[in-house]
Structure formats: structure tokens, C-alpha cells
Amino acid sequence: MQATTEQLQQISIFSGLEPEQLAYLKPHTLVKNYLRGEIILHEGDRLPAKLFSVLSGTIQVKKTASTGKETILRTLSTGELFAAPSLFGDGISPATVVSDRDCQILTVDRAVLLEMIRQTPEIALRILVVMNDRLQHLHNAVHGLASERAIVRLARLIHTSVMEEGTESTTAGLCLRSRLPYYQIARSIGITYEECVRLFKQLQPIVSYHRGGQIVLRDRHKLEEIAAGD
């Protein structure tokens, strides 16, 4: 089905466009639903010439090494773009994209998007900001894997989730809104499942892990200190 004007406005690079500009894009959009765990793109897939973005829910971008080890490169949520090579690269998916929660994916035909960029160059600048952010994230991730202790990477992942997703008060305490199971954390920061369990035991006075990936924050200030490498 086509995207609505309201749905297009949820995509970061389209927010602020005039109604007539959004109306121009609408006939060239497609919204698809994916259940949790469904594969949206396989690494190595030939990509259609479209802009890919998350309309609702969350997705995970994963890379698998020749050894079979899987690493979660990034988790993306509403409004964010992915599969950049479909627009500006070789048209090959550089990673596997999986639905982390039930989600909707919005695509826009590349030719129409390029015409819109000619009319509104600011869209290109917004895309460049997104790509720069991805490069910076990749740089930080590589640097962290090469030079930072695992406990620092874990604290930083939790702190980032607090800042991006927020917390809520529950009977267990102040909990992260997003669930972070052991396996997801381990694959995100380059450690084993067993090491992840051990690290949480070390951090028990600061954060606690509960079944299903629920994390309770006990000492935010101390968590920030560890995340900063102190």
C-alpha cells in the first residue's frame, strides 16, 4: 500500500516538506509489514533502486563473518534510513536486515527521490547528515572493539539506550524502555554470551538484568562514569 502524508512526515529527511511535495512522493511509495524476526534484506542481495526507511517498529542490521560469528552493527527505529547502497552505491546489500519488532518499512523510488532533491536540495543535506552519523558510529564501534574494555562497551550500550529510548518506572524499579537480551548485547559489543553474563554480575550494584532483557538502572551517575571510560 502507499504511504500517507502523515507517514511520510515521520521519515527524518522528509519532515518539514510542504504538503504538495509529500503529495508528489506518495504515488511512488510502498509500505510493507514485517513480523518480528522476519528478514527484510539478506547480505549480498541485489537492492531495488529505492530509498529504504523504518516507518514503525525497530530493525537490526547484522553482519556475519566467514567464521559464522554474527555481529549486530546497529538497531534502527522509526524515521531512520538503511540500505544506502540502493541509492548511492553498488546496489548490493552490505548486511542482513532483520525485523527486531513487528515493523513497517517504507520505500520510495530512487528516480522520484532524485527529482525531489533537485527541487529541494536540503533533502540531500539531510541524507548526508545521516550518512555522516553512520560513519561516525562505525568509527566509534571499531575503535571501541580495538581499544576499550568490554565493560566500558557494555556500559556505553546501556547508556545509549537510556538516552535514545528512555526509562520508565515499574515495580522492579527504573527500567529501560527497550529490551536488551544477553545475546543481542553480546553480538552488539563483540563478546560472548558467557562474558556478557559475567559483566552484568560485575555491574550488579549499578544495573541489574532480568528475564527477557529487562534492565533496571540503579546508579545512573556511576553508569555514565564507566561508559566514559573512568
Image (spheres, rainbow, N blue to C red):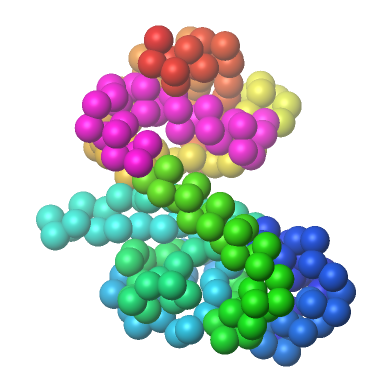
Residue 99 locus on image (x, y percent): 50, 63
Quadrant location, the N terminus: bottom right
- Of residues 110 and 36, the one nearer the viewer is 110
Q: Main secondary structure of the magenta part?
A: helix
| Side of 64 relative to 99 (left or right) | left
Residue sitting at x 37%, y 78%: 91
Residue 230, located in which quarter of the rendered image? Answer: top left
| Side of 56 relative to 51 (left or right) | right
Span shown in magenta: 139-167
Q: Is residue 63 above or below residue 112?
A: above
Q: Is residue 159 above or below residue 75?
A: above
Number of numbered discs? 0
Residue 17 locus on image (x, y percent): 79, 67
Residue 229 locus on image (x, y percent): 38, 16
Residue sitting at x 29%, y 24%: 148
Residue 188 colored in magenta in the image: no
Residue sitting at x 45%, y 67%: 84
| Side of 130 relative to 147 (left or right) | right
Residue 115 locus on image (x, y percent): 64, 83
Find the residue positioned furthest to the bottom: 27
Residue 153 colored in magenta in the image: yes
Residue 1 in view here: no
- Of residues 73 and 84, the one nearer the viewer is 84
